[in-house]
Image (cartoon, rainbow, N blue to C red):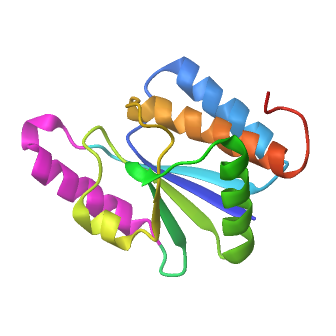
Amino acid sequence: MRLRLVCVGRLSESWLREAEREYLKRLGRFCRIEVSEVADSPDRIGIERGLRLEGERLLAKLAANERVVALDPAGQSFDSPGFASWLERRLTDYPAGLTLLIGGSNGFAPEVLARCNERLSLSPLTFPHQLTRIILLEQLFRGFKISRGETYHK
């Protein structure tokens, strides 16, 4: 099973990088997972231009045969067991891999959303995009644990 996260921006805080390392280590027993980053655009160039540039960078990272899911507040949401089932189905149905996109602070360019096969919401709440990465990694770990009947999801 191959999972890939493609994220706009870098993790700027050491505690976020440490959390990412920990969850990547934990996830390693369930799947092959990689995280790649594209540069975010400064707000001073304007939101529309920034989204376009970030979109070009994201699209350049995607292969034609990948199942691509954007993290989007307007996407489908699940409880933890539902997310575990969704994840298991996607990884079974798409052996070429599943790629999850985390946008920057202004979201995604329309072209990126058009390329995505589906959209997923972690919560109706708004999170900083750097923290979203950690939340997603934790939910992936939780999903694998649930799918395997292991205790964790209390």
Taking depth in this image into account, of 104 and 39 the one nearest to the observer is 104
Residue 27 seen from this side? yes
x and y percent of residue 141 in the render? 73, 41
Q: Which image quarter: residue 127? A: top left
Q: Is residue 39 above or below residue 42?
A: below
- In the rendered structure, the answer to whether residue 42 lies left or right of residue 28 reads left
Residue 63 sits above or below residue 46 on the image: below
On the rendered structure, is 103 left or right of 135? left
Q: Residue at x 32, y 42 (%)?
A: 104
Could you tell me how many numbered marks the image carries?
0
Residue 95 visible in the shown view: no
* Place of residue 108 in the rendered image (x, y in percent of width and height, measured from the top left): 29, 53
Q: Is residue 16 left or right of residue 47?
A: right
Q: Main secondary structure of the magenta part?
A: helix
Query: Height in image: 134 above or below 27?
Result: above
Which residue is found at the position 28% from the left and 59% from the top?
A: 55
Q: Is residue 53 magenta?
A: yes
Name the residue at 49% across, 67% down. Answer: 68
Q: Quadrant of the C terminus?
A: top right
**Corner quadrant of residue 96:** bottom right
Percent x, y of residue 128: 39, 29
Q: Which residues are magenta?
A: 41-62
- Magenta stretch holds residue 24: no
| Residue 66 location (% of width, % of height) | 54, 74
Residue appearing at x 48%, y 37% in the figure = 123
Quarter-wise, where is residue 153 in the image? top right
Which residue is outermost to the bottom? 65
